Amino acid sequence: MAPWRPRAPMGSSVMPTYNILKGVLINGQPVEPVGAGFSHRLLTDLLRGTCGFDGVILSDWAISKDANSACLTGQPPQKPSDIAMCWGVEHLSAVERVALGVNAGLDQFGGEDDPALLLAAVDRGLISPERIDQSVLRVLTQTFELGLFDQPFVDPEQAERLVGSAAFREAGLAAQTRSLVPLKDGALRAEDVIFVHGMTDAALKARGLAITTDPAQATAALIRLSTPYQVLHPTFFFGSRQHEGDLDFKADHPDLALLHSLPDGVRKIVIIHLDRPAILTNIAPLADGLYGEFGVSDGALLDVLTGQASAQSRLPFSLPRSMEAVRRRHWDCSNDDPDPLYSLGV
């Protein structure tokens, strides 16, 4: 009997990482010191051979481009056109990079719409027509499986009926309410006078809830926060948009100061946007209700807090107690914190 091998479905795609995988062995042989999109050992030997994958392999973006000074250093400030990821093959020409990627196992290059490099590689004999046919077959097979040639033209009247329909909006709202993670249950009451921070008051007014701008007059405070972050790579195109750095609310953080300033007797319901695993060690004790969210509307949030819907999700990662605990963790493990403030799956 042939040995069992994991097998991916035909109708799927894989995008290799930009990274050079150092110290990785496959059948005792080291992976080539190149970005994964150029690695025959990873894409053909392992993914297609050992794992039996027969779908489309699509490279990540810009792996055939030259890395200029702005790409490598962020100086001058990096523009989208400066982004390149030809790691490990910087010494090759763009045509040679394309040939290496295709022969390694790539079927498509992400972000490329000019076939000139591919045609040049074929003309120079760096890629065989038979190899091109393999990729064409994989791409067209998925295109037909998706039915993109069956009804190639959109019916505008049907699109008008479907897009934004009441049923779809209702399903989307239900998904949002279920996605909230109840770390500490808390609710708004019909008689509450609510102080609001971090959100507009339009959704509250639409529900007839009483609002005040004076915390001394409030019976409840509704506080929406975001996980703290720093911008550590401001001159890089993506770095200027990324949330990096520490995860904790420092002693001088204005949101922490606001929570401390609220009068005793005001119920504090805190909702934290978990685009990163926030450290809530000095936030949780101040909160009478605490919820994690991943991008919900004010309306969906109020549906949960007023009892019209229930929060049903669990944490997809643990929330650490301190930055010291974060620094002790392994960067490539999702659940190696022995004593988190909130555990994975809570």
Image (cartoon, grey):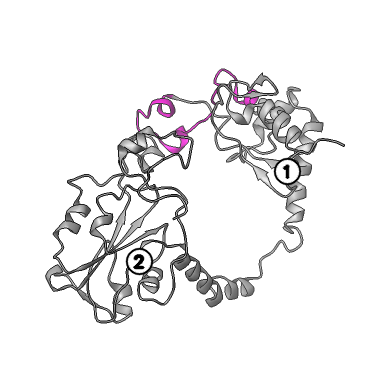
Find residue 99 and report its horizontal and vertical position in percent: 68, 26
C-alpha separation, residue under disc 2 versus residue under disc 1:
45 Å
Indicate whether 38 appears above or below 213. Answer: above
How many other residues sit within 10 Å of disc 2, few (<14), some (14-19) or many (≥20)?
A: some
Find residue 284 and report its horizontal and vertical position in percent: 28, 55
Pick the quarter of the image with the N terminus.
Answer: top right
Q: Nearer the viewer, mark 2 or mark 1?
A: 2
Mark toward the start of the polypeptide (2 vs 1): 1
At numbered mark 1, what does the secondary structure look like: helix, strand or loop?
Answer: loop
Kindly give the residue lying farthest to the right in the view shown: 1
Residue 205: name its quadrant.
Answer: bottom left
Which residue position is annotated with label 2? 185
Q: Nearer the viewer, residue 230 or 280?
A: 280
Q: Amino acid at mark 2?
A: Asp
Indicate whether 301 appears above or below 89. Answer: below
Q: Nearer the viewer, residue 128 or 234?
A: 234
Indicate whether 32 appears above or below 225. Answer: above
Residue in the picture at 55% in, 72% down: 168
Find residue 179 and report its horizontal and vertical position in percent: 46, 62
Q: Nearer the viewer, residue 70 or 295?
A: 295
User: Along the horizontal axis of the image, is 278 left or right of 151?
Assistant: left
| Residue 64 appearing in the image | yes
Q: What range is drawn magenta here?
A: 69-97
Q: Amino acid at mark 1?
A: Gly
Residue in the picture at 24% in, 81% down: 191
User: Along the horizontal axis of the image, is 232 left or right of 82?
Assistant: left
Residue in the picture at 62% in, 21% down: 32
Residue 296: name its quadrant.
Answer: bottom left
Which residue position is annotated with label 1? 55
